[in-house]
Amino acid sequence: MLTQRSSQSESWFVEHVKLDQRIMPKRWPDCQELILVQAGEGHLVVNGNPVVYGPGDVFFLAAQDQHSFSMAQRTSVYRLSFSRFFVDSLPARENHTWGYLDAATSPCLGSIATDVADQDKLRALVVMLLAEKQSLRPSSDNCIVESLMAVILSLVCRLLARSAPTTSVQPTHSSEITRRVIAYITRYIGEPHRLRMDTIADAFNYSPSHLSALFKQQVGASIQQFIIRHKLKLVARRLQQTSLTVSEVADEFGFTDVCHLNKLFKRHYKSTPTTYRLNLLSTL
């Protein structure tokens, strides 16, 4: 470990860690975290869900996520943690807000940076931030730290936006409600009881009919259609990036049973989940 957090009151910290199965790094409370894999292979287990990792991979963890490493090879990572208080203190860049950091609460589906250029940019920025931390200059009111963090988080938001549910919403009050509904759906995608129309409407103090009409006008699909499409997109990623069985995936995302998942998946992907996975494996 190359740096240490001096007190829990700090709003961010960065470190380089050589992982040890016996002593794993702990999450700091109420902090989001960026993990950049420098070397090694294995599985990152987030909230009980294993995701394959390798050199260059970048993972974003929400504040409430629990994680551990199952290493197949010796692993070293860069860890960058930051509180929401710190993020809100950063100047927005070009009218940019940090909304995607809040919306990124869906199950961890793999590296957010699959392009080598993006991986290299993030690593270089985090290494510079680590060097600034090691310089022992005060972290508070440090314009270099603020500038580096703003650039890092802008890049992270851009990467998260690529994997977020897509809409063609224009910036209006209605679109802000729609964005919040999408963030809510993303957060609770594996909890069917929270995705009932009346429950969603209650969460936003709207009537079901009013919220449904507003959402469809903005997105072009009903809330339930959007939920199904988003679930199936996540299922497809699970089939590609994990070794979970189809039954386990169906259970994770709240499908009644495998038959229910098969029917919906085939309608959208023209094949069953099992065939879809086999086709992916045949291309490797």
Image (cartoon, grey):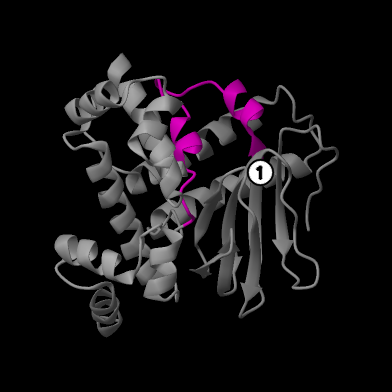
- Local secondary structure at mark 1: strand
Query: Would residue 153 appear left or right of 4 to someone viewing this image?
Result: left
Give the quadrant of residue 140: top right
- Is 215 a magenta residue? no
- Magenta residues span 82-108
Query: Would residue 134 appear left or right of 90 to someone viewing this image?
Result: right
Q: Which residue is mark 1?
A: 81
**Residue in the image at 30% along x and 56% along y:** 233
Query: Would residue 91 appear left or right of 96 to someone viewing this image?
Result: right
Query: Would residue 18 appear left or right of 255 to someone viewing this image?
Result: right
> Is residue 144 visible in the rendered structure shown here?
no
Residue 4 in the image, given as x and y percentages of width and height: 81, 48
**Residue in the image at 82% along x and 37% along y:** 8
Residue 240 in the image, given as x and y percentages of width and height: 35, 70
**Residue in the image at 39% along x and 42% along y:** 195
Question: 283 or 230, which lies in front?
Answer: 230
